[in-house]
Amino acid sequence: MSEKMILIPGRSSKQGTSLNQGKLKEEYKEVTSTLEMNSDDMNKMGLVDGDTVRLSNETGETTVRCIGVKPEDLPAGIAFIPYGPPSSQLMASDTAGCGMPLSKHMEVEIEKIST
């Protein structure tokens, strides 16, 4: 079962501190490949913390693990991922002249990867 959601990539404190350690370090890779989802959305999709999901849109696709957050911390239908290689796979090259790809309102399809 897949769901369309709005993905918001952005900075997080964990992403920032792990970036200081280096982009090739395991901590940075883990942080930037972890999708945060509303726990109610996860329940609806039959997902549990640590499940692997595929995110896809018209630009590309990536595979990450997901964790749930309280509904009051992340609205239904919205997912968050720290900036990094996985989120970059979903961003088009257009920067609208600002130098940073447009990324704050990407519609993505999220589906569980069978293991």
Image (tube, rainbow, N blue to C red):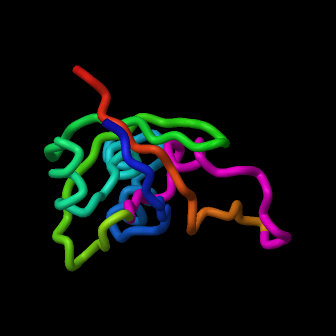
Question: In the image, is 34 to the left or to the right of 16?
Answer: left
At a point 16% along the width and 46% down the height, the residue shown is 49
**Depicted 78 relative to depicted 27: above or below:** below
Q: Which of the 4 quarters of the picture holds residue 40? A: bottom left
Instruction: Verify whether residue 96 appears in magenta.
Output: yes
At which x and y percent is residue 91?
64, 51
Residue 4 in the image, given as x and y percentages of width and height: 44, 51
Instruction: Tell me which residue sits at (19%, 57%) in the image.
Output: 68
Q: Quadrant of residue 53?
A: top left
Residue 110 on the magenta segment: no
35 relative to 114 in the view: left or right: right
Count of labels shown? Answer: 0
- Give the residue at the far top of this rendering: 115
> Measured along the vertical axis of the image, is residue 56 above or below residue 68?
above
Residue under the point 14% across and 44% down:
48
Q: Point out residue 101 in the picture as x, y percentages from the top left corner.
A: 70, 60
Q: Return the residue nearer the eye: 7 or 65.
A: 7
Residue at the limit of the structure toward the bottom, as seen here: 72
Q: Position of residue 75 (x, y in %)?
A: 31, 73
**Foreground of the two, 108 or 83:** 108
Q: Which residues are magenta?
A: 78-98
Query: Which part of the image, by quadrant, shows the C terminus?
Result: top left
**Residue furthest to the right:** 97
Residue at point 15%, 51% (across, down): 43
Check the picture and name the quadrant holding the N terminus.
top left
As drawn, 36 above or below 12: above
